Image (cartoon, rainbow, N blue to C red):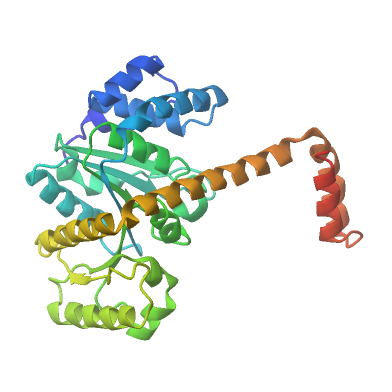
Amino acid sequence: MSALPITDCCDRNPGAGIPPDDALVAGVLARERRALAKAITLIESTRPDHQERAREVLAALLPHTGRAIRIGISGAPGAGKSTFIEAFGNYLIDSGRRLAVLAVDPSSSLSGGSILGDKTRMESLCHREEAFIRPSPSAGSLGGVAAKTREAMLACEAAGFDVVIIETVGVGQSETTVAGMVDMFCLLQLPNAGDDLQAIKKGIVEIADVVLVNKADIDPKAAEFTRVQWKNALALLRPVHPQWKPPVLAVSSARRQGIAEFWHEIEKYRELMEKSGEFAAKRQRQALDWMWNLIDSGLRHFFREHPAVRRDLPECTEAVGDGKMTPTAAAYRLLRDLD
């Protein structure tokens, strides 16, 4: 396997070599890949001074965002997400577009480390100048979505990428989390993955804008059978958008079959949503939801770091655990500490 280009590799030493903010913003807007990588490194840093700088950088980049189509790709491990993204990405680049991929890798619950192996699974796409692939560790974030994925997506848009894909771990709440930050959410399934009743039980179906039955070339009959099952399952559910009925397509990443049809559905979806005004309204709702998520997270952090709460928390925790205090009473006591 040939070496990966260093131009879009992650800088895992936060702050190392990050240029001044004005130079960083200018580099991102000039579509310099290394500047974009440095900006995302700054965004992902947990250092308070870096977080403050990241907010300033994002504020400067914000007027240059919003032009890309945001696509979420999810599916169970083994569904072929990375292989599909590589085939789809090469198709987009061959069509004259630029693609950014934000791939979230699962972090170990024991060591906290991540393999960050998506770039090795997208080797040909890695070597395309029009592609930028950024693997990030989930680091325990809800649903396997890196906490700063949304901000990284804005940086990629400011760097002039036409399509931004967020690939999730594919477990837990990741699907719902990603669906709340993209324009179109795509779910990858495998042939013979279950009947239509099982498909209905999966809440993920309710938020899917398109379902792809991947690896259709291995067993075309099974793929078509699964496609029909999913189509029937979706027909029994109330669509999220009355104007849009989620299509179910059979695709083959290896043979690049169905890729053009998938992009056609994306273009059709965007045109329909923009015409109805739902496209802009959806992005507004997502931005407001994210604001409240950050407020909730910030309040929780503020609460835990409050001196009075830190003083009384061990005593309340022990009392609740020993059955000497109700959880309600302990919660109200700790909340009163904020006064």
User: Which residue does the image show at 12% across and 44% down from the upper left?
Assistant: 93
Q: Nearer the viewer, residue 227 or 17?
A: 227
Would residue 203 be found to the left or right of residue 301 on screen?
left
**Res. 72 in view:** no
Question: In which quadrant will I find the C terminus?
Answer: top right
Q: In the rendering, at what x and y percent does residue 220 appear?
A: 13, 77
Indicate whether 308 appears above or below 330. above
Which quarter of the rendered picture does the N terminus lie within? top left
Q: Position of residue 51 (x, y in %)?
A: 51, 28
Quadrant location of residue 136?
Answer: top left
Which sits in the foreground, 147 or 275?
275
Tell me, yes or no, if residue 326 can be seen here. yes
Horizontal and vertical percent position of residue 278: 34, 57
| 3 relative to 28 in the view: left or right | left
Residue 306 rendering spot, x and y as whole percentages: 76, 35
* Residue 242 vertical placement versus 281 (above, below): below
**Which residue is at a point 22% across and 27% down the rendered structure image?**
31
Residue at the spot 35% in from the left edge and 40% down from the top edge: 153
In the image, 29: left or right of 204?
Answer: left
Q: Please count the marks in the image.
A: 0
Q: Residue at x 8, y 46 (%)?
A: 95
- Relative to 264, residue 10 above or below: above
